[in-house]
């Protein structure tokens, strides 16, 4: 093996003789051998490359100092000389995406995933946009580190730049495939997302619930009922239909494809439903059948779920569509009162009612009465009950609740009066019921 100092002597001799072109050729030869040029050699190589890049007849070498240095970096990394590669990388005056990618790929190929990730972070801080090769190398590093947060960051870059990285990835798994599907879908290119999903199926990559959920969202984004049915069949085949996020995505897909009957049927067949699922169906019907949207909203209370801001937005929009805005306002206050009541903040619920810009209807007072009954607020409960009776004097259920409030509070005289009123209405309470 030729000693490493020969590289320095040879380059020095060329330089003294002024034979710059031969120095560059000599360095190229050195980079493919077992001789490794030292830093002064590298600096002169970059200098001559800068000169040659401006000449009309440059030598037959890659143009530009960064590309010349990048070739040496790749050579170093292939031989496991990472320190030398990094030293050369740090000396490049203007590093482009190719140089950064070479360094990242070099670390990754040697199993130094954390170092590869740090170079990638440094690259982004310098404002260099990654390309598909960069991203594929970084994904390999993320897998090596088993870091979900790193993968999420790369996923965001895929979405931002819309890179097709699948043919650059050597180890293709569900994570890399799903990243591509999600990237296309978030960019509004559901067709390309579904194309990747079909390729994923053809290559028999093991599916997971998340990849199916993303594929269903792609179908929803392009409002493709036929593709949606196909993905739904795939979900059933793999047994993911009971997965709540997947099921919710299916409901949303049918709604966006304006197949509301299928959305409703699948919704009622679900073994479990959360607030997001209810909101999805309510919003889906709100876009085309506001009356049904309000009906579904009224059913939501049977599952002991408290509406959130998304629910209220859909309800208000549905009411506006029906030109019953006053009803919409009452519904909003009723929902907020219900939220406060469920949380046990009954006094705050009443204060909200007192501050309403219009007279509360029976729905609002009924919600407050229910909260008072659950959380045992007899004074406010009596107030709410009497307000309800003012609006609907023959509402026998209110008499029953009010009499029970008096009984629980030990006010037997008032309890007897309520019973007398009920008998006068011919509404005697049946035994064993409340």
Image (spheres, rainbow, N blue to C red):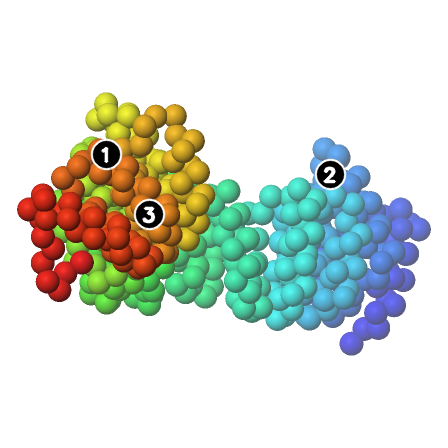
- Quarter of the image for the N terminus: give it: bottom right
Q: How far, Cα to Cα, is label 3 from label 1? A: 14 Å
Q: Which residue is at a point 55% across and 59% down the rendered structure image?
A: 149
Taking the image as drawn, is residue 6 in sight? yes
Q: Which residue is at a point 62% across and 66% down the rendered structure image?
A: 113
Q: Is residue 26 above or below residue 97?
A: below
Taking the image as drawn, is residue 228 in sight? no
- Quarter of the image for the C terminus: give it: bottom left
Q: Earlier in the sequence, mark 2 or mark 1?
A: 2
- SS type, badge 1: helix
Q: Is residue 340 above or below residue 208?
A: above
Return the residue found at the far left: 426
The residue where tag 3 is placed is 381
The residue where tag 2 is placed is 53
Quick one: 14 or 143, which is closer to the camera?
Answer: 143
| Disc number lying in front (2 or 1) | 1
Q: Earlier in the sequence, mark 3 or mark 2?
A: 2
| Disc number lying in front (3 or 2) | 3
Give the x, y percent position of residue 372: 34, 51
The residue where tag 1 is placed is 390
- SS type, badge 3: helix
């Amino acid at each position: 093996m030729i000693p490493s100092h020969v590289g320095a002597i040879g380059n020095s001799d060329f330089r003294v003789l002024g034979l710059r072109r031969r120095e560059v050729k000599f360095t190229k030869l050195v980079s493919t051998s077992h001789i490794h040029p030292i830093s002064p050699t590298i600096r002169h190589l970059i200098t001559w490359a800068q000169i040659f890049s401006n000449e009309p007849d440059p030598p037959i070498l890659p143009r530009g100092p960064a590309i010349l240095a990048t070739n040496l970096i790749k050579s170093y990394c292939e031989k496991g000389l990472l320190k030398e590669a990094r030293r050369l990388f740090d000396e490049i005056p203007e590093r482009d995406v190719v140089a950064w990618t070479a360094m990242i790929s070099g670390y990754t190929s040697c199993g130094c995933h954390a170092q590869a990730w740090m170079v990638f972070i440094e690259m982004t801080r310098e404002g260099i946009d990654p390309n598909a090769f960069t991203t594929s190398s970084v994904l390999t590093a993320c897998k090596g580190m088993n870091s979900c947060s790193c993968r999420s960051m790369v996923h965001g870059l895929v979405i931002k730049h819309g890179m097709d990285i699948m043919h650059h990835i050597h180890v293709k798994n569900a994570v890399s495939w799903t990243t591509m599907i999600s990237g296309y879908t978030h960019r509004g290119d559901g067709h390309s997302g579904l194309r990747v999903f079909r390729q994923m199926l053809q290559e028999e990559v093991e599916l997971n619930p998340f990849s199916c959920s993303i594929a269903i969202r792609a179908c929803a984004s392009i409002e493709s009922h036929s593709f949606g049915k196909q993905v739904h069949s795939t979900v059933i085949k793999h047994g993911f239909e009971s997965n709540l996020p997947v099921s919710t995505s299916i409901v949303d897909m049918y709604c966006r494809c304006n197949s509301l009957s299928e959305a409703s049927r699948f919704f009622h067949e679900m073994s479990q439903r959360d607030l997001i699922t209810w909101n999805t169906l309510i919003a889906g019907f709100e876009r085309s059948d506001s009356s049904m949207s309000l009906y579904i909203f009224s059913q939501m209370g049977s599952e002991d779920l408290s509406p959130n801001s998304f629910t209220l937005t859909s309800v208000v929009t549905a009411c506006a569509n029906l030109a019953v805005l006053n009803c919409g306002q009452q519904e909003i206050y009723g929902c907020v009162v219900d939220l406060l009541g469920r949380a046990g903040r009954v006094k705050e619920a009443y204060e909200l009612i007192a501050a309403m810009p219009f007279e509360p209807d029976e729905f609002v007072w009924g919600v407050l009465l229910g909260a008072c009954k659950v959380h045992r607020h007899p004074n406010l409960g009596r107030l709410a009950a009497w307000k309800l009776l003012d609006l609907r004097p023959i509402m026998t259920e209110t008499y029953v609740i009010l009499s029970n409030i008096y009984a629980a509070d030990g006010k037997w005289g008032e309890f007897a009066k309520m019973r007398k009123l009920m008998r006068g209405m011919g509404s005697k309470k049946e035994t064993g019921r409340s």
